Amino acid sequence: MNVVKFLLGLMTLFTVVFGTDQELLQAKDINKIMKQIFDQHVDKKEITGSILKNSFKVYIDQFDPDRIYLLEQEVAPFLKMSDSEVNRILAQYQQNQFPEYEDLNNVIQKSILRAQKMREEEIQRDAAQLFRKSASYSADGYEDWRDPDLHRAFAKDIGELRERQRTSMVEFIAAENKRYGDKFVLERADQVLILYTKDAKLHENQYLFLSDNGLVMDKGEKENIFIMHVLKALANSLDAHTTVMSSNEASDMRMRLEKETVGIGVQLHITKDDRVTIDLLVDGGPAAKSGLVNLKDQIVKIDGTPVKGKSLNEILEMIRGKVGSTVTLVLKRSVEEQGHQTDKEITVPLVRDEITVDEDRVVVKSEKFGNGVIGIIKLDSFYQSEKGVTSENDVRDAIEKLKKQGNLRGLVLDLRENSGGFLSQAVKVVGLFITNGVVVISKYFNGEEHFYRDMDGKKAYDGPLVVLTSKATASAAEIVAQALQDYGVGVIVGDEHTYGKGSIQSQTVTENKGATFFKVTVGKYYTVSGKTPQVQGVKADVVVPSQLLHENIGEEYLDYPLAQDTIPAAYDDNLADVAANLKSWYMHYYIPSLQHKKDVWVGVIPQLKANSGQRIARNQEYQAFLKGSGSSNSFNNQKSEEEISDLQLDEAVNVLKDMINLQTQARYSK
């Protein structure tokens, strides 16, 4: 798994939603937006010197996480400020003045120009050497300055910085080798280096105040992006999950949360020779319904503007728009005319519409076992939309689909790499496996406690259940895992513990208003046992390691995490938060079918652990993985992530089979 990709994509647990109406940002907006965030934040209520001091570190980390641009002496003035300097910056902040951040951005701009010159010199000097080094590349020698928790040393001099730039290029080539093959990459050496430079410049341009295609921004756009950088740094200084988002970032998050987006229903790909091709047509989307768009068509223009040279983000922004508005594509297509192939351009007008995204919804598998089947349901997020697309409905439908295949003897709920989503959906998914009861208790910034209950009195499934987790199981997924563990209806199998995110965020994303969006930590959640997974995560009952075994992933590695604590358990729901006029209904319809804590699996967990340990010890592939995990010349590099993942899933299924067999033995031994 790509750890950086996971961290960037980590979803938060969402409840209440607020909106903001903002176009291009100006300096005066910083105070206003930060006040909105402070008003909702769980414990930070005003700007302080400490927050400002932290924000400079965050600003630097966001620009140079790999420490390949800036020198130690360049960042020292911003990381080692005296109290008097911090007080001066605090006074400037109150006056909507941010000269120190401007100074830092100037230092960053100089470091970018220096890095670009280093890259050009390296390529001109001996580009072939970069490809030779990539063939035997090992990251082991760079562990002293590469660390996933961002506690990395800056280069002490230009020579060390140049070596880091060189290593970054070699790493990129090595990754291309792994994906496409050494021979293929070497034959396209010039294109590979162009791709590396293009990727680097996409990151660098936002600090140079250039568009994705290198054009100089106007004054308003420059101020907007600079203020966005400052806001991101300030917000991230409150805690690990409070942040300000651009409209593109918000759009991506909205699609993950709602599984819906507005567009024409195509998936695009930019080829190595810079052609924009259509790789997928979404069923029911405007492009597919038109009958005028084909797979592999090349997009030449959008609304009259050529797309060549534009980034994927720029192209997607051109396609996005309001429901009912029209976008006109000019497509190039290879057609057969008079016995030979020729390129033909066609113009296709399409009306934008809401698109339901099926990617990353549930995946259902099964295998025969005894007189029935074992089911596997993989759920990658907790989503809901106004059109009724929800994770609850998808999981329920998956269970019914499995039952139709035969006697459903056992179920694996795969929550690995599930990074969260809507709190309400986490509660409803837990409700598929219990009758009635408290699932989550949330404590908010204003002191309020909210009890989230399952109240339908029914289970969609009541049998042996394994919840498969990893270090990348986070937020709402941790609620589901811990609540099912609390009630004793499921056994947790996977990495020693999950991510450890027990905080709740509100967000302005799903209201779809304005150009400025943020999410802010407003509280902390606890499951029915009174425990929160904050920092410590959900502990596995049976440890079956994933490919993340040695990765430093989790809340404990982030800056400014909330503390871990406990509250009283709520198995015997006293309805303390329920209005007096509603209690009679709860007493009559809810309390009689409360889910009791089951101990059926507690007694067999030692046997499950022993059996699993013996199987893993005998599994040569698994042993090779465990020994090699974390090494650059390891089993990890010979096996794909999917194959390693299958080893873990196979063992989870074996644990489930043990549960079924032990349950059967216990029933008939009585």
Image (spheres, rainbow, N blue to C red):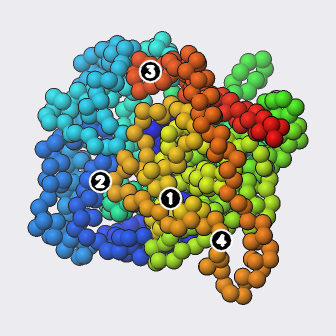
Mark closer to the chain start, 1 or 3: 1
Circle 3 sits on which residue? 628
Q: With respect to residue 520, does 256 lie above or below?
A: above
Q: Hey, what amino acid is under mark 4?
A: Asp
The local crowd at label 3, few if under 14, some if 14 to 19, many if 20 or more residues have their Cα within 10 Å, is some
Alpha carbon separation for disc pair 4 and 1: 18 Å
- Ranked by sequence position, the earlier of labels 4 and 2 is 2
- Above or below, 269 against 77 in this view is above
Q: Which residue is identified by label 2?
A: 59
Asked whether disc 2 touches disc 1, contact meaning CB atoms under 8 Å apart, the reply is no
Foreground tag (2 vs 3)? 3
Residue density around tag 2, few if under 14, some if 14–19, many if 20 or more, within 10 Å: many
- Could you tell me how far apart the alpha carbons at marks 4 and 2 are, in whole angstroms? 46 Å
N-term-proximal mark, 4 vs 1? 1
Along the polypeptide, which appears first: circle 2 or circle 3?
Answer: 2
Circle 1 or circle 3, nearest the eye: 1
Name the residue located 73 percent from the left edge and 27 percent from the top edge: 335
Q: Which mark is residue 573?
A: 4
Q: Tag 1 or tag 2, which sits nearer the N-term?
A: 2
